[in-house]
Image (spheres, rainbow, N blue to C red):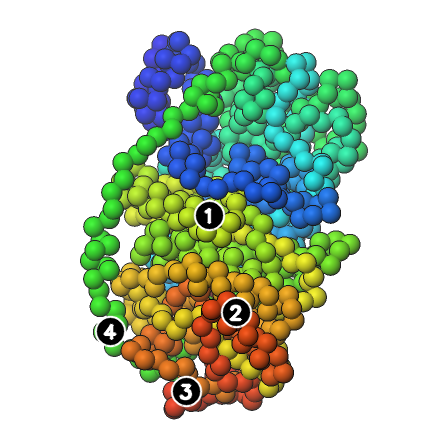
Amino acid sequence: MSHSPQVLAEHGLTQEEYASIRQQIGREPNLLELGLFSVLWSEHCCYKSSRKLFKRFPTQAPQVLVGPGENAGVVSIGDGDAVAFKLESHNHPSYLEPFQGSATGIGGVVRDVFTMGATPIAGMSSLRFGLPEHPRTAFLVKGCAAGMSFYANAMGLACVGGELSFEASYNGNCLVNAFVLGLLRADKIFKGTASGHGNLIVYVGAKTGADGIHGATMASAEFGEKGAENIPTVQAGDPLIEKMLMEACLELFQSDAVVGIQDMGAAGLTSSSIEMASRAGSGIELELSKVPIRQKGMTPYEIMLSESQERMLLVAKKERAEEVLAICRKWGLEGAIIGHVTDTGRVVIFEAGTVVADLPIGPLTTGAPLLERPTRRPKRLDEEWAVEVDALPTPPVDKTLLGLLASPSIADKAWLYSQFDAGIGLGTVLGAGKADASLVRVRRTQKGLAISIDCNARHVYADPFEGTQQAVAECTRNLACVGATPLGLTDGLNFGNPENPEIMWEVSESISGIAEACKALEVPVISGNVSLYNETDGKAIFPTPIIGVVGLVPDVDKAVGLGFAREGDVILWLGPLEGALGASAWLQWAHGKSAGGKLAPLDWKLEKALQQVLLQGVREGLLASAHDMAEGGFLVTLAECCLADKEQPMGVRVQLPPRGKLSMTQLLFGEAPSRALVSCKPEVLAAVEALCKSHNLPYWRLGEVGGQKLSIGEGILEAPLSVFSEAFHGGFEKALGL
C-alpha cells in the first residue's frame, strides 16, 4: 500500500525520494522501513545538500590518522600520542528547550570523541543568540549556559573557552555548537564498523525511551509559528550515566574484545547499527525484544528511531561478549546482546522473532540522495557593497570605544566562563579570556594543545567566500599567538534553508572558502558537522561556518597571553594599517547596520608572514603578549590588552602610526585580517624588528605599557582605564539583565 503525501511530509520525504526508495528496494516500504529511510536520508544524517561539496576539502596530511567520515577526526601529536576532536551542533533542540538541548549537545560530542578511544580533556563552545533586547534572548543564554555547564561539570570535562555573539538574525534560531578534544594512543584508535560474521551486537548504556523520536528529521526542517510543538523531539540527558558509559568504554578499549563502536546519536539505534554495517560492507540482524526500554509498549518504530541519550552500540567478538557485559555491569550499566553481524548486506529487524523490517543496507546509506541544488548569488550584495560606509558620521572616539567594549559580543564573558570548571584535570594552561587560543597541557609532557574557535558571521554574510577564508585565517592566527602549529580543522556549518538558491550559494561559497584557506595554510579538514534549515518563518540566520582548529605547542612554558605583561614593555602593531569599516562592529554599533560596504581582502603572503613572526616570536621567547587584531579593530584590541587582567589592568602611552589616506575611524576601528598587537621587553625589540624584516612583515612601534590611563597621542584619547574597565567587564551582564 502506497504511503500518503501527508505521511511522507511527516517523515520529511519528497515524492521523488519516495519513488527512489521504491525503485531501490523493489517494493513499497512498510511504516517502520519508511521511518528508517526518513532519518538516514535526512539532511542531518546524510548531508544530501552538502556532501558533494566536501570533495573540495584537503583532508590528508602526515599527521592525519583518521579523517572525515568517522565519529571524530584523529591526528598524531608525536611520541605515540594522538588527539581526537569534533565540532557538533544542537541548534534546534537548544532553541526549543535550552537546558536539555545544550546539555545533550555536549553529551553527543563527548561520545563522538570517546568512541574513538580517546579520553576527553577539553571542551569549548560557539554560541549565537538574537539581540539582547529580544524577549527570548536572556532566557536562551541562561538556559544554554546552565545546560552546558551542568553536563560538562558532571562529566569532569574542562571547558576552557569559546566564543559568543549576538545578532538579530538569530532572534528565532539560536546556534549552539560544542567542541570536544580527547587524548588517546595512536595505536589504540577505534572505529564505527560492524565486521566479522557472527560477531555480536551489544547495547550499552541508558534504557531506550520515547524522547527524541524524529530528532534528526526535526533538525532538517525550519521552524514555523508552532515550533514549540517540537519540544517532545528534544532529548533528555543524564551526565552521570554518560560518565559511567565513558569509563566502561575506555576500559573495554584496553582489551581486544571490541571490534567496532558507535554512539547512538542522531537517528539512534537506526544510524548506529546500519552505518556500522555499511562501513564494513556487512549485514546486521537485530532483535528489538532484547533492547532495554524504560517505557512499556514501545513499538519497533519508536525503539529504532528514539534518540534517548547516553547509549552506545558495540560489536563484540562472539567469544568475548560475556566479558563485555561483565565490564558493563561493573560500571552499573545496562548491557544486552541485541543482534549479530551477518554477511548478507541487509538489515533485518525482528520483534519477538517476527520480521518487522528487511532492507538492503546500500539504499539506506550509499543510496541516499546527493543533491546538486541550484545556487544564485544574492542581489543584496551589489547594494550592500555599494554603500559608502567611510562617508558615514562617527561618534567621538571615547564614546565609540566605550560602546563597543560594552556591547555583549565584545564585552568580557566572565559571567559565562565562570559557570564552567576549567580546572578539572589540572591541565588548563591558558583558559577563557586569557589568550587568543586556549591551551591545555598534554599529561606527563611539556607539550600543549591549543584550540581556537571562531567565525565573524557579519563578515561571512557580507562575502561568504572571503569571510570564511578569514575565519580560518583568524583561527590559525590565534594559534600562532600562543606559539602553536596547526594540526587539523573541524567545522560546524550553520546555514538557512538550502532549497533557497541564495542560501545554497552561501553554503557553496563558504565551503570553497574553507577549502582554499586550508590549502593555503596546509591545514587538513579532519571532521565536521552541517546544520541547515536554521530558519524561522522564512527568516534565515546569517551564514555561520564555525571554524575550530587545534595546534601543537612544543613547550607550554613559553606560551603567552593576550594581556600586556609588565610596565615598560614596548607595544608594536604587526601587519598592514589598512582596515575596512564594511560589516564591522563599528558599523553595527554606530549605525545599527550589520551589512554594508566591503571587507578588507586577505593577502595570503602577509598572513603567512604574520603567523610565522608570531610563532617564532613566542617560541623564541621574544614576545611578552600577542593579540589578534579582529572585531572592533585596533582600538578595541588595544583596550582588551590593557584590561585582560581585571584586577591588575595595564595602561598604555602610544602614538598612532602615520595614517596617510586612511580616516581616523578607519585606522582606529577598521577591521582587516593579518594584523596583531604584540609587546616585548625593550632589550629584545631589535630582535623582534629583525624578525619582522626577515619575513617582509610591516610593523610600527606604537609606544609602551605603563600607568593607569589609555593615552593616545595627538589628543585622540586620554582617559582612566577604570572608565573602560567598567564598560568591558560589566557590559555583558548589563546588556542581558543578568
- Say the numbered circle drawn on residue 392: 4
Dot 4 or dot 1, earlier in sequence: 4
Label 1, label 2: how many angstroms apart (C-alpha)? 24 Å
Q: Nearer the viewer, residue 252 or 248?
A: 252
Q: Which residue is mark 1?
A: 519
Residue kind at label 1, given as amino acid type: Lys
Label 3, label 1: how many angstroms apart (C-alpha)? 42 Å
Label 4, label 1: how many angstroms apart (C-alpha)? 37 Å
Q: Which residue is mark 3?
A: 717
Q: Nearer the viewer, mark 2 or mark 4?
A: 2
Pinpoint residue 580: horizontal percent, then vertical percent: 33, 68
Dot 3 or dot 4, earlier in sequence: 4
Dot 1 or dot 2, earlier in sequence: 1
Kindly check if marks 2 and 4 are in contact, taking CB atoms under 8 A apart as contact: no
Q: Nearer the viewer, mark 3 or mark 1?
A: 1
Residue kind at label 3, given as amino acid type: Leu
Residue 285 quadrant? top right
Residue 467 visible in the picture: yes
Dot 2 or dot 4, earlier in sequence: 4
Left or right position of 731 against 1: right
Q: Nearer the viewer, residue 493 or 81?
A: 81
Q: Is residue 170 above or below residue 92?
A: below
